[in-house]
Amino acid sequence: GERWCGARATRGVAAAGGKYQFEVVIEDEGLARAGWSTAAAALDLGTDASGVGYGGTAKKSHARRFEDYGRPYGKGDVVTCWLDLDAPGGA
């Protein structure tokens, strides 16, 4: 069956502003979700109001709301997550 794996960074970003980026290399089959959260967020990214995720099923998630977004991704793909806290609304 499909496996679910995750990771969380041990360093945060400055909430006052700045631009941040990281990449995730998908090395195996299974489900994946990449994104951003606060330290208080659930480990299941995108299921509460403190995080947002982008899943390999081409869905973005926030507070257990899933919407079509982007393209599906899987084994062999690299997903880049950008955060611009200087943009209006923190895009």
Image (tube, rainbow, N blue to C red):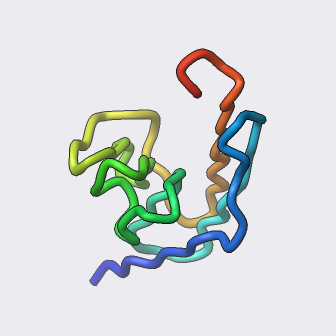
Of residues 41 and 54, the one drawn nearer to the viewer in this rendering: 41
Identify which residue is drawn at 40% across, 62% down: 41
Identify which residue is drawn at 58% across, 27% down: 90
Of residues 91 and 55, the one drawn nearer to the viewer in this rendering: 91
Q: Is residue 61 left or right of residue 75?
A: left
Identify which residue is drawn at 52% across, 52% down: 35
User: Where is the C terminus found, in terms of image quarters?
Assistant: top right
Which quadrant would residue 19 be assigned to in this image? top right
Identify which residue is drawn at 36% across, 81% down: 3
User: Where is the N terminus found, in terms of image quarters?
Assistant: bottom left
Give the percent coordinates (x, y) of residue 38: 50, 56
Which quadrant would residue 59 be assigned to in this image? top left
Q: Is residue 43 visible?
A: yes
Give the percent coordinates (x, y) of residue 28: 54, 76
Residue 89 higher or lower than 39, as above or below: above
Residue 9 higher or lower than 20, as above or below: below
Give the percent coordinates (x, y) of residue 15: 65, 43
Give the percent coordinates (x, y) of residue 71: 45, 39
Q: Is residue 19 left or right of residue 65?
A: right
Q: Is residue 18 left or right of residue 84?
A: right
Residue found at the far top of this picture: 88
